[in-house]
């Protein structure tokens, strides 16, 4: 109470220190002219911030207003031309209420579109406009690894461990939300989270047992009576990150949670995992390539005798150099424009440990998987578990979309990016980009 009173006095006595309206820089892609999020802007005295989904960053420090200021500009996959001393940025004279636009060339083939989760998605735009920044939906400050499925006229979304504003420990029993089937990925996506009375997301998978519950392989399957069932694979986790129980679970629409159906023996090498996709009358499961398939019906999902191992012909290489590439997690989808199966995956052990995303294509889900091309790099930062969104595709699949988890975890980077860290970032890839040809021949 004493501290609050003292602060109140100090604020009352202090003169107005900041401008009524800040100065803004707006960073846009030099090719597409779209706003670029996650670009760092830094002054010569190390005041820095990152662009929001509007590509904006704001400053109202009196030291910066009304005089010439150098703003260093950098960002994963984007790069301004260096001056004679190797500095990359712009020199402007900031004035309150002014917004200067800067075009930044893209080095990545894929284009960064927006951050999908967390707080302050349009923080700087709201600040510049003088409008209130709304609280994050579901009070989600960060979340790990997305999966999605179409079910009963809606799109269902789930995420792993989720952080909150009020305490370092958040939700560890899976976060869940719905959206309409038709979405515009160019604009904000509003998730209708399943929440607790306090507004924070609830654990949608309270499978009995200590530790977190992680879900994946979510898919809607029809049973013999034609009723759609939303199902997934669960894993119970103990420190450090070991699975001590695994099984099948199903969403109960009345109770609004996933319930355990049965366990899968821990020594089983064959079980639904990763992401699900359809091919003909079969359902495939896997990551960068599939490892299991089964008939496309609920009863087959229940019966392990109908689970068949998938053997893929995999020898990923860099399309330009022929160097062998080791794939981490990813997702596979059919692309009607290329008439190929496409894998978007994280490279393991690339120039940025788990920060590189690659594209590859094959004639069948089983392969042969050969040439790949790097489409994204994140410098000294992790971007894992990418998921394709064919529902967002443009021009019959010529332009594809995917998202992944952006996190300092595993990167060794001691400085997590404010607001962006441990959240989902959406990218867009034009398969007609001439740079893609080397992996399409």
Image (spheres, helix red, strand yellow):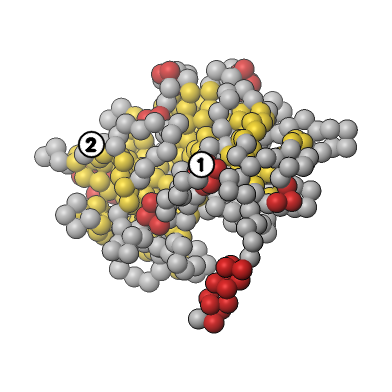
Q: Is residue 102 depicted above or below 385 in this figure?
A: above
Residue at image location 37% in from the left, 55% down from the top: 138
Quarter-of-image position of residue 128: top right
Q: As drawn, is 420 to the left or to the right of 190?
A: right
Camera-near label (2 vs 1) is 1
* Label 2: few (<14), some (14–19) or many (≥20) C-alpha neighbours in 10 Å: few
Where, quadrant-wise, is the C terminus in this rendering? top right
> Could one spot residue 123 in this view of the protein?
yes
Q: Is residue 311 depicted above or below 274 in this figure?
A: above
Pick the residue in front: 304 or 40.
40
Q: Which residue is mark 1?
A: 129
Q: Is residue 8 depicted above or below 262 in this figure?
A: below
Task: Please provide percent x and percent y for residue 259.
Answer: 24, 59
Q: Which residue is mark 2?
A: 153
Pick the residue in front: 402 or 273.
402
Residue at image location 47% in from the left, 68% down from the top: 167
Residue at image location 26% in from the left, 59% down from the top: 260
Upstream in the sequence, badge 2 or badge 1? Answer: 1
Q: SS of the residue at dot 2?
A: loop
Task: Please provide percent x and percent y for residue 275.
Answer: 40, 42
Q: As drawn, is 74 to the left or to the right of 261?
A: right
Residue at image location 45% in from the left, 31% down from the top: 186
* Label 1: few (<14), some (14–19) or many (≥20) C-alpha neighbours in 10 Å: few
Task: Please provide percent x and percent y for residue 62.
Answer: 70, 51
Q: SS of the residue at dot 1?
A: helix
> Could one spot residue 349 in this view of the protein?
no
């Amino acid at each position: 109470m004493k501290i609050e009173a003292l602060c109140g006095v100090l604020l009352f006595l202090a003169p107005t220190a900041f401008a009524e309206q800040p100065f803004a820089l707006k960073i846009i892609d030099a090719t597409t002219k779209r706003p670029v999020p996650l670009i760092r802007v830094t002054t010569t005295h190390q005041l820095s911030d990152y662009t929001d989904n509007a590509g904006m960053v704001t400053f109202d420090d009196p030291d910066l207003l009304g005089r010439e200021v150098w703003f260093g500009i950098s960002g994963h996959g984007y790069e301004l031309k260096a001056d004679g001393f190797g500095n990359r940025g712009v020199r402007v004279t900031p004035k309150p209420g002014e917004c200067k636009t800067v075009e930044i060339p893209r080095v990545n083939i894929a284009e960064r579109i927006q951050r999908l989760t967390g707080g302050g998605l349009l923080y700087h735009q709201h600040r510049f406009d003088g409008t209130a920044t709304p609280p994050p939906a579901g009070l989600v400050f960060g979340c790990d690894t997305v999966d999605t499925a179409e079910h009963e006229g809606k799109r269902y979304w789930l995420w792993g461990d989720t952080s909150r504003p009020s305490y370092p420990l958040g939700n560890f029993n899976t976060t869940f939300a719905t959206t309409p089937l038709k979405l515009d990925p160019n604009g904000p996506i509003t998730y209708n989270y399943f929440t607790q009375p306090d507004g924070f997301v609830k654990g949608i998978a309270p499978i009995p047992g200590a530790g977190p519950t992680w879900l994946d392989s979510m898919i809607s399957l029809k049973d013999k009576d034609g009723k759609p069932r939303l199902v997934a694979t669960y894993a119970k986790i103990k420190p450090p990150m070991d699975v001590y129980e695994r099984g099948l679970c199903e969403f109960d629409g009345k109770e609004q949670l996933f319930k355990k159906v049965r366990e899968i023996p821990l020594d089983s090498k064959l079980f639904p995992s990763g992401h699900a996709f359809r091919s003909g009358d079969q359902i495939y499961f896997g990551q960068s390539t599939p490892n299991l398939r089964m008939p496309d019906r609920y009863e087959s999902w229940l019966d392990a005798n109908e689970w068949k191992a998938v053997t893929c012909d995999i020898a990923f290489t860099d399309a330009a150099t022929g160097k062998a590439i080791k794939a981490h997690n990813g997702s596979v989808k059919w692309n009607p424009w290329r008439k190929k199966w496409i894998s978007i995956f994280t490279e393991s052990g690339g120039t940025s440990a788990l920060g590189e995303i690659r594209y590859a294509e094959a004639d069948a889900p089983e392969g042969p998987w050969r040439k790949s091309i790097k489409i994204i790099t994140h410098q000294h930062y992790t971007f894992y578990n990418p998921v394709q969104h064919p529902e967002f595709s443009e021009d019959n699949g010529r332009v594809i979309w995917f998202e992944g988890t952006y996190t300092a975890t595993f990167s060794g980077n001691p400085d997590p990016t404010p607001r962006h860290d441990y959240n989902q970032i959406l990218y867009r890839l034009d398969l007609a980009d001439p740079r893609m040809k080397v992996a399409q021949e």
